[in-house]
Image (cartoon, rainbow, N blue to C red):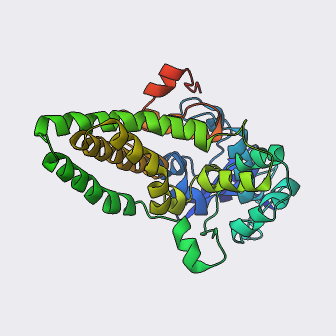
Amino acid sequence: MLYTTEDIAQHNTKASCWIVVDDKVYDVTDFVGDHPGGEDILLQFAGTNITSVLKDPQFQVHSDAAYDLLQEYCIGTVHPDSVTMKKVVDKPIYTKSKQDREFLDLRKPLFPQLWNATYSKKFYLEQVHRPRYTPYYVPYFPDPLLDVLSRTSWYMVPTIWLPFVVYQLYCSLHAPFGAVSSTFTAFAGGILFWTLFEYVMHRFLFHLDDLLPDHPIALLLHFTLHGIHHHMPMDRMRLVMPPALTAILSIPVFRLAHGLFIPTIAYGVVAGAFFGYVCYDMVHYYLHHAQVIETHFKEMKRYHLAHHYKDYESGFGITSKIWDYIFGTVLVYD
Protein backbone atom coordinates (compact mmCIF):
# COMPACT_ATOMS: atom_id res chain seq x y z
CA MET A 1 0.00 0.00 0.00
CA LEU A 2 1.03 3.62 -0.51
CA TYR A 3 1.30 6.23 2.26
CA THR A 4 2.14 9.91 2.27
CA THR A 5 4.78 11.36 4.58
CA GLU A 6 1.99 13.38 6.19
CA ASP A 7 0.07 10.23 7.03
CA ILE A 8 3.20 8.48 8.30
CA ALA A 9 4.13 11.43 10.53
CA GLN A 10 0.86 11.03 12.45
CA HIS A 11 2.00 7.62 13.75
CA ASN A 12 4.61 8.95 16.16
CA THR A 13 3.61 7.51 19.54
CA LYS A 14 4.06 4.29 21.48
CA ALA A 15 0.45 3.41 20.70
CA SER A 16 1.09 3.71 16.96
CA CYS A 17 4.69 3.83 15.79
CA TRP A 18 5.61 3.86 12.11
CA ILE A 19 9.01 4.36 10.53
CA VAL A 20 10.37 4.59 6.99
CA VAL A 21 13.48 2.79 5.72
CA ASP A 22 14.48 3.05 2.05
CA ASP A 23 10.99 4.29 1.10
CA LYS A 24 9.29 1.31 2.75
CA VAL A 25 6.87 1.87 5.60
CA TYR A 26 7.01 -0.26 8.75
CA ASP A 27 4.50 -0.46 11.60
CA VAL A 28 6.76 -1.34 14.56
CA THR A 29 4.19 -0.63 17.29
CA ASP A 30 4.35 -4.18 18.67
CA PHE A 31 8.14 -4.01 18.80
CA VAL A 32 8.58 -0.67 20.59
CA GLY A 33 8.68 -2.09 24.11
CA ASP A 34 11.27 -4.71 23.18
CA HIS A 35 13.54 -2.63 20.97
CA PRO A 36 17.08 -3.70 22.01
CA GLY A 37 18.22 -0.09 22.33
CA GLY A 38 15.23 0.88 24.45
CA GLU A 39 11.88 2.35 23.44
CA ASP A 40 12.99 5.97 23.92
CA ILE A 41 15.53 5.75 21.09
CA LEU A 42 12.96 4.31 18.71
CA LEU A 43 10.18 6.71 19.69
CA GLN A 44 12.29 9.80 19.06
CA PHE A 45 12.29 8.83 15.38
CA ALA A 46 8.67 7.63 15.19
CA GLY A 47 6.86 8.82 12.09
CA THR A 48 10.09 9.67 10.23
CA ASN A 49 12.56 8.23 7.74
CA ILE A 50 15.35 6.47 9.69
CA THR A 51 17.37 5.09 6.77
CA SER A 52 20.45 7.12 7.69
CA VAL A 53 19.98 6.58 11.43
CA LEU A 54 20.32 2.80 11.04
CA LYS A 55 23.80 3.36 9.59
CA ASP A 56 24.90 5.96 12.13
CA PRO A 57 27.57 4.67 14.60
CA GLN A 58 26.20 7.08 17.23
CA PHE A 59 23.04 4.94 17.47
CA GLN A 60 24.67 1.57 16.60
CA VAL A 61 25.09 0.50 13.00
CA HIS A 62 22.41 -2.12 12.39
CA SER A 63 23.27 -5.55 11.03
CA ASP A 64 21.72 -7.57 8.22
CA ALA A 65 19.85 -9.56 10.88
CA ALA A 66 18.17 -6.37 12.09
CA TYR A 67 17.03 -5.57 8.55
CA ASP A 68 15.71 -9.12 8.17
CA LEU A 69 13.68 -8.71 11.37
CA LEU A 70 12.34 -5.37 10.14
CA GLN A 71 10.76 -6.98 7.07
CA GLU A 72 8.15 -8.65 9.27
CA TYR A 73 6.61 -5.23 9.95
CA CYS A 74 6.42 -3.89 6.40
CA ILE A 75 2.98 -2.46 5.58
CA GLY A 76 3.68 -0.60 2.32
CA THR A 77 5.74 2.08 0.62
CA VAL A 78 5.97 5.86 0.56
CA HIS A 79 3.82 7.39 -2.18
CA PRO A 80 5.99 9.05 -4.86
CA ASP A 81 3.96 12.26 -4.77
CA SER A 82 3.64 12.09 -0.96
CA VAL A 83 0.93 14.77 -0.86
CA THR A 84 -2.63 13.54 -1.03
CA MET A 85 -2.49 9.75 -0.99
CA LYS A 86 -4.10 8.39 2.18
CA LYS A 87 -3.94 5.09 3.97
CA VAL A 88 -5.96 2.31 2.36
CA VAL A 89 -5.68 -0.57 4.81
CA ASP A 90 -4.35 -1.17 8.32
CA LYS A 91 -3.36 -4.83 8.12
CA PRO A 92 0.42 -5.38 8.16
CA ILE A 93 2.05 -7.47 5.48
CA TYR A 94 3.80 -10.35 7.27
CA THR A 95 6.68 -11.59 5.14
CA LYS A 96 8.86 -14.61 5.62
CA SER A 97 11.58 -15.96 3.39
CA LYS A 98 11.52 -19.52 2.08
CA GLN A 99 14.42 -20.35 4.39
CA ASP A 100 12.50 -19.10 7.44
CA ARG A 101 9.61 -21.41 6.62
CA GLU A 102 12.01 -24.34 6.27
CA PHE A 103 13.58 -23.69 9.68
CA LEU A 104 11.14 -23.12 12.56
CA ASP A 105 7.47 -22.20 12.68
CA LEU A 106 7.35 -19.77 15.62
CA ARG A 107 3.62 -20.36 16.05
CA LYS A 108 4.14 -24.00 17.06
CA PRO A 109 6.10 -25.74 19.86
CA LEU A 110 9.79 -25.76 19.00
CA PHE A 111 11.03 -29.04 20.49
CA PRO A 112 9.09 -31.38 18.14
CA GLN A 113 10.26 -29.37 15.13
CA LEU A 114 13.91 -29.68 16.16
CA TRP A 115 13.51 -33.34 17.15
CA ASN A 116 12.20 -34.18 13.67
CA ALA A 117 14.51 -31.81 11.80
CA THR A 118 16.56 -33.00 8.83
CA TYR A 119 18.47 -29.82 7.99
CA SER A 120 22.25 -29.64 8.06
CA LYS A 121 24.47 -28.06 10.70
CA LYS A 122 25.45 -25.31 8.25
CA PHE A 123 21.82 -24.39 7.59
CA TYR A 124 20.98 -24.58 11.30
CA LEU A 125 23.79 -22.21 12.32
CA GLU A 126 22.86 -19.74 9.57
CA GLN A 127 19.26 -19.66 10.72
CA VAL A 128 19.66 -19.78 14.51
CA HIS A 129 21.86 -16.69 14.43
CA ARG A 130 19.27 -14.68 12.51
CA PRO A 131 17.37 -12.95 15.35
CA ARG A 132 13.58 -13.05 15.26
CA TYR A 133 11.01 -11.22 17.34
CA THR A 134 7.49 -12.37 18.19
CA PRO A 135 4.97 -10.35 20.22
CA TYR A 136 3.60 -13.62 21.62
CA TYR A 137 5.02 -16.47 23.69
CA VAL A 138 6.46 -19.38 21.69
CA PRO A 139 6.20 -22.69 23.59
CA TYR A 140 9.15 -25.06 23.57
CA PHE A 141 7.29 -28.24 24.54
CA PRO A 142 3.73 -29.21 23.47
CA ASP A 143 2.90 -30.28 27.03
CA PRO A 144 2.12 -27.19 29.19
CA LEU A 145 3.52 -28.73 32.38
CA LEU A 146 6.78 -29.70 30.71
CA ASP A 147 7.01 -26.33 29.01
CA VAL A 148 7.11 -24.64 32.42
CA LEU A 149 10.64 -26.05 32.86
CA SER A 150 11.83 -24.24 29.74
CA ARG A 151 10.93 -20.71 30.82
CA THR A 152 11.82 -18.53 33.77
CA SER A 153 10.80 -15.05 34.92
CA TRP A 154 13.81 -12.89 35.81
CA TYR A 155 12.82 -12.50 39.47
CA MET A 156 12.99 -16.25 40.04
CA VAL A 157 16.79 -16.17 39.84
CA PRO A 158 17.40 -13.97 42.93
CA THR A 159 14.38 -15.50 44.70
CA ILE A 160 15.79 -19.03 44.45
CA TRP A 161 19.54 -18.53 44.53
CA LEU A 162 20.17 -15.64 46.94
CA PRO A 163 18.87 -17.69 49.92
CA PHE A 164 21.19 -20.46 48.73
CA VAL A 165 24.09 -17.98 48.76
CA VAL A 166 23.23 -16.98 52.34
CA TYR A 167 23.08 -20.65 53.37
CA GLN A 168 26.51 -21.33 51.84
CA LEU A 169 27.95 -18.34 53.73
CA TYR A 170 26.41 -19.68 56.95
CA CYS A 171 28.00 -23.08 56.32
CA SER A 172 31.35 -21.44 55.62
CA LEU A 173 31.31 -19.47 58.87
CA HIS A 174 30.30 -22.51 60.95
CA ALA A 175 32.60 -25.05 59.30
CA PRO A 176 35.84 -26.13 61.04
CA PHE A 177 38.40 -23.30 60.94
CA GLY A 178 35.66 -20.93 59.82
CA ALA A 179 36.33 -17.22 60.18
CA VAL A 180 34.94 -14.03 58.74
CA SER A 181 38.20 -13.21 56.97
CA SER A 182 38.53 -16.60 55.28
CA THR A 183 34.85 -16.60 54.30
CA PHE A 184 35.13 -13.11 52.81
CA THR A 185 38.29 -14.04 50.87
CA ALA A 186 36.70 -17.23 49.57
CA PHE A 187 33.54 -15.34 48.64
CA ALA A 188 35.53 -12.78 46.63
CA GLY A 189 37.46 -15.61 44.99
CA GLY A 190 34.17 -17.29 44.05
CA ILE A 191 32.95 -14.13 42.34
CA LEU A 192 36.21 -13.90 40.38
CA PHE A 193 35.90 -17.58 39.49
CA TRP A 194 32.37 -16.98 38.21
CA THR A 195 33.50 -14.24 35.81
CA LEU A 196 35.91 -16.73 34.23
CA PHE A 197 33.33 -19.53 34.31
CA GLU A 198 30.82 -17.18 32.64
CA TYR A 199 33.25 -16.51 29.82
CA VAL A 200 34.29 -20.16 29.35
CA MET A 201 30.70 -21.40 29.44
CA HIS A 202 29.51 -18.77 26.95
CA ARG A 203 32.40 -19.28 24.56
CA PHE A 204 33.13 -23.01 24.73
CA LEU A 205 29.74 -24.52 25.65
CA PHE A 206 27.05 -22.17 24.38
CA HIS A 207 29.00 -21.31 21.21
CA LEU A 208 30.50 -24.68 20.46
CA ASP A 209 29.60 -24.05 16.82
CA ASP A 210 32.72 -25.23 14.98
CA LEU A 211 32.99 -28.48 16.95
CA LEU A 212 29.25 -29.13 16.97
CA PRO A 213 28.50 -32.54 15.41
CA ASP A 214 26.35 -32.43 12.30
CA HIS A 215 23.60 -34.46 13.96
CA PRO A 216 19.98 -33.55 14.83
CA ILE A 217 20.43 -34.38 18.52
CA ALA A 218 23.52 -32.16 18.76
CA LEU A 219 21.64 -29.32 17.08
CA LEU A 220 18.72 -29.84 19.48
CA LEU A 221 21.03 -29.61 22.51
CA HIS A 222 22.72 -26.51 21.09
CA PHE A 223 19.37 -24.83 20.54
CA THR A 224 18.13 -25.77 24.02
CA LEU A 225 21.22 -24.42 25.78
CA HIS A 226 21.68 -21.15 23.95
CA GLY A 227 20.52 -21.22 20.33
CA ILE A 228 16.97 -20.32 21.33
CA HIS A 229 18.26 -17.13 22.94
CA HIS A 230 20.13 -16.09 19.79
CA HIS A 231 17.15 -16.87 17.58
CA MET A 232 14.72 -14.97 19.84
CA PRO A 233 16.95 -12.63 21.89
CA MET A 234 14.08 -10.50 23.19
CA ASP A 235 12.07 -13.40 24.65
CA ARG A 236 11.68 -12.28 28.27
CA MET A 237 10.83 -15.77 29.51
CA ARG A 238 14.01 -17.40 28.17
CA LEU A 239 16.58 -14.76 28.94
CA VAL A 240 17.67 -16.05 32.35
CA MET A 241 18.65 -19.65 32.97
CA PRO A 242 15.94 -22.07 34.20
CA PRO A 243 16.70 -23.26 37.76
CA ALA A 244 16.86 -26.92 36.69
CA LEU A 245 19.53 -26.16 34.09
CA THR A 246 21.45 -24.01 36.58
CA ALA A 247 21.49 -26.88 39.06
CA ILE A 248 22.86 -29.28 36.43
CA LEU A 249 25.58 -26.89 35.24
CA SER A 250 26.58 -26.13 38.85
CA ILE A 251 27.55 -29.73 39.67
CA PRO A 252 31.16 -29.27 38.39
CA VAL A 253 31.46 -26.10 40.51
CA PHE A 254 30.45 -27.98 43.68
CA ARG A 255 32.80 -30.86 42.95
CA LEU A 256 35.72 -28.59 42.10
CA ALA A 257 35.31 -26.38 45.18
CA HIS A 258 34.96 -29.23 47.67
CA GLY A 259 37.70 -31.23 45.95
CA LEU A 260 40.27 -28.44 46.16
CA PHE A 261 39.50 -26.66 49.43
CA ILE A 262 38.66 -27.28 53.06
CA PRO A 263 34.93 -26.90 53.84
CA THR A 264 35.00 -23.30 55.08
CA ILE A 265 36.74 -22.15 51.89
CA ALA A 266 34.68 -24.41 49.63
CA TYR A 267 31.37 -23.09 50.95
CA GLY A 268 32.59 -19.51 50.60
CA VAL A 269 33.72 -20.08 47.01
CA VAL A 270 30.37 -21.64 46.09
CA ALA A 271 28.55 -18.70 47.71
CA GLY A 272 30.63 -16.22 45.71
CA ALA A 273 30.21 -18.17 42.46
CA PHE A 274 26.43 -18.27 42.84
CA PHE A 275 26.29 -14.61 43.81
CA GLY A 276 28.28 -13.86 40.66
CA TYR A 277 25.80 -15.98 38.68
CA VAL A 278 22.82 -14.04 40.06
CA CYS A 279 24.50 -10.76 39.12
CA TYR A 280 25.26 -12.18 35.65
CA ASP A 281 21.67 -13.18 34.91
CA MET A 282 20.28 -9.92 36.27
CA VAL A 283 22.76 -7.87 34.22
CA HIS A 284 21.96 -9.96 31.14
CA TYR A 285 18.26 -9.27 31.52
CA TYR A 286 18.95 -5.61 32.28
CA LEU A 287 21.03 -5.19 29.10
CA HIS A 288 18.27 -6.64 26.93
CA HIS A 289 15.21 -5.02 28.48
CA ALA A 290 16.09 -1.73 30.12
CA GLN A 291 17.14 1.81 29.34
CA VAL A 292 20.45 1.32 31.12
CA ILE A 293 22.44 3.88 33.06
CA GLU A 294 25.39 5.58 31.35
CA THR A 295 28.16 4.24 33.60
CA HIS A 296 29.50 0.88 32.40
CA PHE A 297 26.13 -0.60 31.46
CA LYS A 298 25.49 1.54 28.38
CA GLU A 299 28.74 0.32 26.86
CA MET A 300 28.05 -3.30 27.88
CA LYS A 301 24.60 -3.07 26.31
CA ARG A 302 26.08 -1.93 22.99
CA TYR A 303 28.74 -4.63 23.32
CA HIS A 304 26.29 -7.44 24.00
CA LEU A 305 23.83 -6.36 21.32
CA ALA A 306 26.72 -6.33 18.86
CA HIS A 307 27.37 -9.95 19.88
CA HIS A 308 23.78 -10.80 18.97
CA TYR A 309 23.30 -8.71 15.85
CA LYS A 310 26.80 -8.40 14.38
CA ASP A 311 29.34 -11.03 15.42
CA TYR A 312 28.35 -13.94 17.63
CA GLU A 313 31.87 -15.42 17.39
CA SER A 314 33.39 -12.80 19.72
CA GLY A 315 32.33 -10.55 22.58
CA PHE A 316 31.52 -13.32 25.07
CA GLY A 317 31.64 -11.18 28.21
CA ILE A 318 28.27 -10.13 29.65
CA THR A 319 29.09 -8.35 32.90
CA SER A 320 32.51 -7.10 31.72
CA LYS A 321 35.06 -7.38 28.89
CA ILE A 322 37.97 -8.44 31.09
CA TRP A 323 38.27 -12.04 29.86
CA ASP A 324 37.65 -10.99 26.24
CA TYR A 325 40.72 -8.76 26.54
CA ILE A 326 42.77 -11.51 28.19
CA PHE A 327 41.85 -14.16 25.59
CA GLY A 328 41.78 -11.87 22.56
CA THR A 329 38.06 -12.10 21.72
CA VAL A 330 37.11 -8.44 22.11
CA LEU A 331 34.32 -7.52 19.72
CA VAL A 332 35.06 -4.37 17.69
CA TYR A 333 31.89 -2.75 16.38
CA ASP A 334 32.69 0.88 15.59
Vertical placement of 149 versus 189: above or below? Answer: below
Q: Is residue 168 visible?
A: yes
Q: Nearer the viewer, residue 228 or 288?
A: 228
Percent x, y for residue 115?
A: 76, 64
Count of labels in the image: 0
Q: Is residue 166 left or right of residue 333?
A: left
Vertical placement of 80 versus 188: above or below? Answer: below
Percent x, y for residue 234?
A: 56, 55
Q: Name the quarter where the C terminus is drawn.
A: top right
Residue at the spot 63% in from the left edge and 58% down from the top edge: 28
Q: Nearer the viewer, residue 76 or 192?
A: 192
Vertical placement of 191 versus 26: above or below? Answer: above
Q: Is residue 78 visible?
A: no
Q: Nearer the viewer, residue 86 or 235?
A: 235
Percent x, y for residue 117?
A: 82, 61
Q: Residue furthest bottom?
A: 144
Residue at the spot 69% in from the left edge and 71% down from the top edge: 109
Percent x, y for residue 315?
A: 55, 32
Q: Nearer the viewer, residue 203 or 20?
A: 203
Q: Is residue 327 left or right of residue 62?
A: left
Q: Name the quarter where the N terminus is drawn.
A: bottom right
Quadrant in which residue 100 is drawn? bottom right
Q: Is residue 284 left or right of residue 65?
A: left
Q: Is residue 329 left or right of residue 251?
A: right
